[in-house]
Image: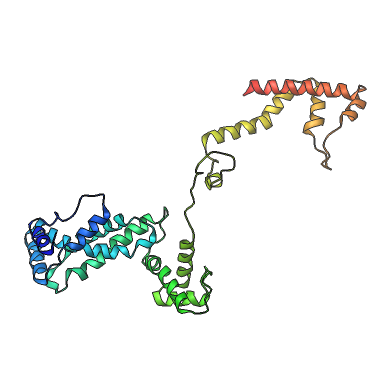
Amino acid sequence: MNTSSASALTLRDPWAVVPSLGNLDAYISAANRVPLLTHEEEIAFATRLRASGDLEAAGKLVVSHLRLVVSISRKYLGYGLPHGDLIQEGNVGLMKAVKRFDPDQGVRLVSYAMHWIKAEIHEYILKNWRMVKVATTKAQRKLFFNLRSMKQSMKDDAADVDTHRATLTQSEVDTLARTLNVKREEVLEMETRLSGGDVALEPQGDDSEETFAPIAYLSDVTNEPSHVLEARKRDWLAGDGIALALDGLDARSRRIVEERWLKVNDDSSGGMTLHDLADEYGVSAERIRQIEVAAMKKMRKALAESV
């Protein structure tokens, strides 16, 4: 398609030059072949759009500036986002610019549209660069889109800079803060955000014991219903439950259990030993152990029946 035929096609149907979706290279090639409007044509189409909402005139203004979006979007490829998505968002900004463009201001649409195109691309990058939004305030946005390029420029200008050094020096922080008119603390905070990465809240991949994620220590089960019920049950067993089970034992069995498991002396040495109890009752230590085992079995049964 030569320039004259492309111009004629654009005048008849401004959208016909855009190829079917799915081939980004074909789209970019077609967008770059669309002829630019003269100043007089631009004013005429913009006037028609303002006066009567002429969509055909709006289409001609948009299509003739698609190459501008392609050019601007290329500058943001370093953020690792799909080029097609960047162009798509830039086109949204272009259409917003066309809708608001006032031909009486004496400004060309290309100058007016650049702001809207960049604004939409910036918003898309901030929403999709990371799962967690890294910039919300005006100062943070300024830092996000300027910090990396300015750091590289400072390294290129300094002959004695260690190219492997990742952190900023105090003088570099001061220079960046002064140049961008932000606080030093904001420069340091954004530098930390940009140097970090997303961490999955829950484990990714298999469920092996080695898998660990923040959810393991961030989750709070204090007020989780099953946890509350389990805690109540545990507290009851440790208090009233033990007392109830002990009441079901004969005096000797109860004393043996209390001395062996429930008594703590002042020196933290615990209760009496099997031999101590054997001497007291005049039996062997093995007999005391047998009584203890039988008593514990009876207590476990009583506790199981009480819950």
Instruction: Name the quadrant containing residue 154.
Output: bottom left
* Between 137 and 241, the one nearer to me in the picture: 137
- Number of numbered markers: 0
Instruction: Name the quadrant containing residue 36.
Output: bottom left
Task: State whether residue 304 appears in this view.
Answer: yes
Quarter of the image for the C terminus: give it.
top right
Q: Residue at x 8, y 71 (%)?
A: 40
Using the image, determine if residue 115 lies above or below residue 91. Answer: below
* Between 110 and 235, the one nearer to me in the picture: 110
Would you say 189 lies left or right of 240 here?
A: left
In the image, residue 233 lies at what x, y percent? 61, 30
Q: Residue at x 54, y 46 (%)?
A: 213
Q: Residue at x 34, y 55 (%)?
A: 82
Using the image, determine if residue 61 lies above or below residue 19. Answer: below
Would you say 7 lies left or right of 253 here?
A: left
In the image, residue 143 lies at what x, y percent? 40, 68
Q: Which colour scheme appears in the figure? A: rainbow
Quarter of the image for the N terminus: give it.
bottom left
Task: State whether residue 136 appears in this view.
Answer: no
In the image, residue 155 lies at what x, y percent? 47, 75
In the image, residue 300 lies at what x, y percent? 70, 23
Would you say 196 lies left or right of 87 here?
A: right
Would you say 266 lies left or right of 11 here?
A: right
